[in-house]
Amino acid sequence: MSQLIDLVSEHGLWVVFLTTLAARVGLPLPAAPLLIVAGGMAVSEQISMTAVLSVAVIANVLGDGAWFYAGRTHGARVMRLLCRISLSPDSCVRQSESLISRWGGSSLIAAKFVPGVSVVAAPMAGALGMSVARFLFYGALSGALWSVAYLGLGLIFSDQIQVVLNAMANAGSVATAVILILVLAFVAWRYWRRAVFLRSIEMSRITVDDLYRLIEEGIDPLVIDVRSEAGFLMDARQIPGALNINLDDLRRRARELPRDREIVVYCNCPNDASAARAARILAGQGFTRVRPLEGGIDAWVAAGRDTVVFEIGARAR
């Protein structure tokens, strides 16, 4: 452990830069705690506060910029990839959509401090068409505020941090083992939450072929697209004849829906999560013939079925 402290003292700027950059890219590295430690070390002049702040901001902009570019060029595919591997596979998209749609560039500041949304906000901004200049301005500002917040904690608790560092150095391998156990426990807890969420959306689904067969046979199922308008900005394709009802509005509008028809709900989210939630909402309202479409709009397109282009503002009110 003493070697680790020496490493931070001698190569602190590189350690801060690489750890922060990796965290912004999405790797589970402790960038925030490292900045707190760096802030405490800056009080005793073991490292330059100005230099640490500068490299932390640069790392934030570079890491977020890479995802912004990916979202700008690949849109919904990048969002699906991120949320498929996320520990919060559905909420990460919906929360970032809501933030950016409501607050624009300033949402990048709030997103820095929201777990599960922080990494997703930058590619979402790119996918929703935010300008490069606007992104760079708010990206640098949010990176600076985030860095100052944790460096400031290090300044405030510098005496306690030094005591902890000294204790860790004396504890050696025991301290390392404790830290490793804590990190593993945190990761295990997050995966447990993910498993609970995935179990909550387990239910019977209807395939694209079965849905198409119902339509061809004249059974006339009611198809509902539960994506938000931000979701349509990333992927405007939808199933012909689908009714557009945002997931957040579904409970309020449930009384408008027929109870004597087959209802199919779909989205373009990982694990059909929003569609499954919509099906549970309708089931809770007494609907007995409602199922999510397996694979959502992507599966419909992959099967070669026709689509129409959703026009923003055309959502039924």
Image (tube, rainbow, N blue to C red):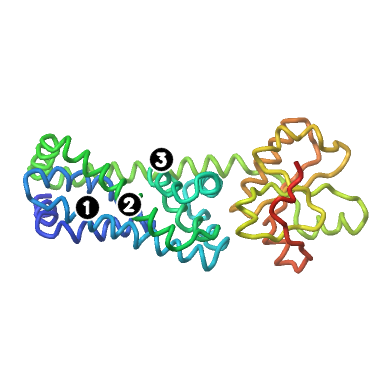
* Disc number for residue 189: 3
Residue linked to disc 2:
143
**Residue at point 12%, 49% (across, down):** 1
* Rendered location of residue 271, percent (x, y): 60, 51
> Horizontal placement of 117 versus 225: left or right?
left
> Horizontal placement of 47 versus 204: left or right?
left
* Disc number for residue 53: 1
- First in sequence, mark 1 or 3: give its number: 1
Q: Nearer the viewer, residue 117 or 233?
A: 233
Crowd class of label 1 (few under 14; some 14 to 19; many from 20; radius 10 Å): many
Secondary structure state at the residue bearing disc 1: helix
Instruction: Indicate which label's residue lies in the foreground, 1 or 3.
Output: 1
Secondary structure state at the residue bearing disc 3: helix
Check the image and name the residue furthest to the right: 218
**Residue at point 41%, 40% (across, down):** 189
- First in sequence, mark 1 or 2: give its number: 1
Secondary structure state at the residue bearing disc 2: helix
> Horizontal placement of 71 versus 177: left or right?
right
Q: Is residue 80 above or below residue 176?
A: below
